[in-house]
Image: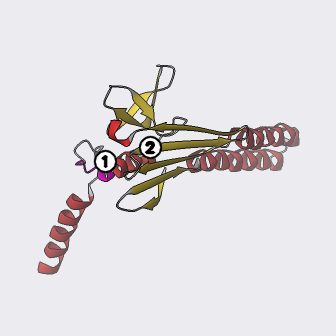
Amino acid sequence: MRIEDKTDTTLTLVDEQADKTLGLTLAGVFVAGMCLFMAWEGFPELLLPGAVLIVVMVVYWKRSKMRSVLVFDRAADRVHLTVTDRKGAEEWEWRLSDVETAVIGTVGAQGTDSGIDRPHLRLTDGTYVPMRPYHAAGSQSWHAVAAVKLFLGQKLEDAPVGWLPPEAFDRHFAEEMARLYRK
């Protein structure tokens, strides 16, 4: 998820599944490269299965492609999620005042644990609302959570190991620059 728009009263997060696109592209390039290498080495019969696999990956990507837009609107006291896929668009809405915080979680809509991080909104009644319609690894999840927390006026206390909040990064960078210039 990336921040598309941010003002004092609104925050818009958009997810166009860039991580899935990148993964399938890299897998396709790898399969094509291996097929060409094997054909070069004298196994041309592997070109057809490789081409079929690449076509299957492209069809899967096209059929599973979706875009989600999550809008936090302070003035209207609402959170609006729109998920658009090949079948059309679905929309959900919650009151912004019902949002307690944003967290990283691994549990899906059916209550099963995938082991893969996904950003969630934790509501005041204890329910969790996924911010993106599918599980995906990567720093996008934490960045979405951080954007929501900062929009809600909350501190970034539960950052993953190795991720520095902007204030800590500025302090660290200033200390390092001062140390380098003293030499």
Instruction: Say which amino acid is labelled 1.
Output: Lys
Residues at marks 2 and 1, CA–CA distance in whole angstroms = 14 Å
Q: Quadrant of residue 10?
A: bottom left
Q: Please tell me which residue is depicted at 25% across the width and 41% down the height of the picture.
A: 158
Left or right? Give the position of 8 relative to 58.
left
**Magenta segment range?**
150-155
* Quarter the C terminus occupies: bottom left
Query: Could you tell me if residue 183 is visible in this image?
Result: no
Q: Please tell me which residue is depicted at 39% across the width and 32% down the height of the picture.
A: 105
Closer to the camera in the image, 182 or 70: 70
Residue designated by label 1: 149
Q: Main secondary structure of the magenta part?
A: loop
Q: Which mark is residue 79?
A: 2
Residue furthest to the top: 111
Q: Please tell me which residue is depicted at 19% across the width and 74% down the height of the picture.
A: 177
Left or right? Give the position of 77 relative to 52.
left
Q: Position of residue 33 (x, y in %)?
A: 73, 50
Judged by depth in the image, the label closer to the viewer, 2 or 1, is 2
Q: Position of residue 48 (x, y in %)?
A: 87, 40
Q: Is residue 176 above or below residue 127?
A: below
Query: Could you tell me if residue 49 is visible in this image?
Result: yes
